[in-house]
Image (cartoon, grey):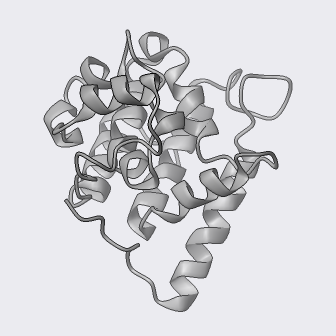
Amino acid sequence: MTIDAAQLRREIEDAFAAVPYPGDNSIVEHKCWECDLIATKYKGKRWTDYKDCPLELIGPPISDAFPLFTPAAFRHYAPLAMLAAAESYMKADTLTEQFLRGIEPAQDDFTARRAARLAAFAPNELRALLSFLRFMKDNHPLDFNAGPSMFDVASLEKAIKTRLEGMEMRGENAPPRSKE
């Protein structure tokens, strides 16, 4: 079933409405000049305050925060990345790829970090993420289907579905909540 941008927006907003702010000291994973810039930019900012203009927070000039976010911050700001990509794909530019690569199941030095980010999502959030991936494949097939394109979403979809099935089998409704 094809989903339009307005339906996707509603699904994302509903799924992530209760995601807590990660806390001022839980935005980035370590301390360096780049992380300090990102922590300062995002301090005290909730995704819901930017849902109608996501690129104001996650866009240029500092649009590469997703690889440096903690799992809680990644989860908290994920709706903005999805909304920006779905509604302003060209303006979002490399943000979409950075966001998706932050949770892809690739095998490298960052595998555990990406797995921790994906594990932070609740089932309804994972379903919204799957809807987002379907939307991107339907609306940007050259970038989001198998082949020598920017991003092959098949392995990410499989990882999300596997995680979702496991959570449902165990009766899990949500990941642990972060503390502000």
Q: In this view, does 94 lie above or below 50?
A: above
Q: 20 above or below 59?
A: below
Q: Which residue is drawn at 52% across and 55% down?
A: 117
Q: Please give the count of numbered marks on the rendered protein.
A: 0
Look at the image and tell me in which quarter the C terminus lies.
bottom left
Q: Quadrant of residue 163?
A: bottom right
Q: In this view, does 21 lie to the left or right of 67?
A: left
Quarter assignment of residue 136: top right
- Vertical comparison of 36 with 24: above or below: above
In depth, the one of 32 and 62 nearer the eye is 32
| Horizontal arrangement in the rendering, residue 63 relative to residue 165 (left or right) | left
| Residue 126 place in picture, x, y as percent | 48, 60
Residue at image position (44%, 37%) is 31
Residue 47 lies, in percent from the top left, at 23, 40
Locate residue 124, reporting x and y percent: 39, 65
Q: Which of the pair 112/6 is nearer the observer?
A: 112
Q: In this view, does 132 lie to the left or right of 153?
A: left
